[in-house]
Image: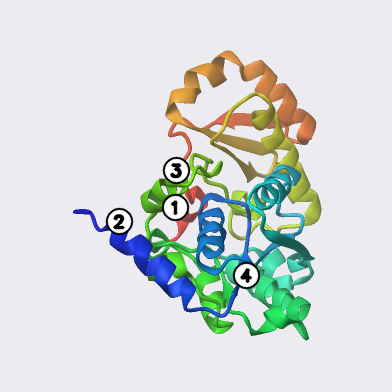
Amino acid sequence: MADGYETRIEALLAALRALPGAVVAFSGGVDSAALVFACRLALGERVLAVTAVSASLPDEELAEARAFCAAHGLRHELVRTRELARAEYRRNAPDRCFHCKDELFVTLAAALAGRPEAGWPVLYGAIADDLAEHRPGGAAARAHGVRAPLAEAGLSKADVRRFSRSHGLGTAEKPAFACLASRVPYGTPVDAALLARLAAAEAVLRNLGYRQFRVRHHDTVARVELLPEDLPRALAERHAIQAGIAKAGYTYVALDLLGYRAGAMNEVLP
């Protein structure tokens, strides 16, 4: 096709077919879901999806990851990562994501040791769009020899959603999601209690029916990002939003007038 989409998809599948098998770091998000499904198409049973469980992953996301694998006949295992045990992660400097991904890949290698899957490459769901963004996790992937087949094939987020739609994946229209620590300003230490507070605050918005949202942590203030088209509704529901998020542990609730935008905490970076 003129836009090269079919060529990119074929390049992805050809690269996957050349592998002996694949262990996919599977978060349950749009990109990793497309990747693990593509692996299933290319490799059949020689695929293992592994989801990291920690305080930074809400229960709802874990449940959706489990459901996706069950629906598509994928072997799925969980590993417990302990990024909060790392002082570098808790410090929450701009390289926090490096330490999170490093913990994931170290834990994965230990879990696979002595198993047949230890000979399979580990893959993760980075896409071409990520190459232009602040993504320290990519450095951890390279250090561990972890591959990003979607990015290698030049697939964008639009490509990933198009592929997912064409195969009827329930994640095709899933809102973008990032770990809960991404809601915390760099330099503010991260701990389990803070992540639990953010999970509870975002559950308020999810339960009210909002699909794309973030609750950004600013000490006693929760800054709520919603899609611009949802702002009028949020104003009408402001008392319910304020009461729910206050119950989660915030004194004040602020509605961000610019609305949701990915990576808003990176706006302060030079």
Q: Please, what is the three-letter code of the amino acid marked with disc 2?
A: Tyr
Q: Do labels 2 and 3 touch, CB within 8 Å?
A: no
Q: Please, what is the three-letter code of the amino acid marked with disc 3?
A: Arg
Q: Do labels 4 and 2 touch, CB within 8 Å?
A: no
* Residue 84: % across, % down: 76, 65
Which residue is denoted by mark 4 in the rendering?
A: 101
Q: Please, what is the three-letter code of the amino acid marked with disc 1?
A: Glu
CA separation, marks 4 and 2? 29 Å
Element under disc 2: helix
Q: Residue at x 48, y 70 (%)?
A: 148
CA separation, marks 3 and 4? 28 Å
Q: Residue furthest left?
A: 2
Q: Residue furthest front?
A: 44
Q: Do labels 2 and 1 touch, CB within 8 Å?
A: no
Q: Nearer the viewer, mark 3 or mark 4?
A: 3
Q: Which mark is residue 77?
A: none
Which residue is denoted by mark 1 in the rendering?
A: 267
Q: Residue furthest top?
A: 236
Which residue is denoted by mark 3 in the rendering?
A: 165
Q: Nearer the viewer, mark 1 or mark 4?
A: 4
Element under disc 1: helix
Element under disc 3: helix
Q: Earlier in the sequence, mark 2 or mark 3?
A: 2
* Residue 229: % across, % down: 44, 24
Q: Do labels 1 and 4 touch, CB within 8 Å?
A: no
Which residue is denoted by mark 2 in the rendering?
A: 5
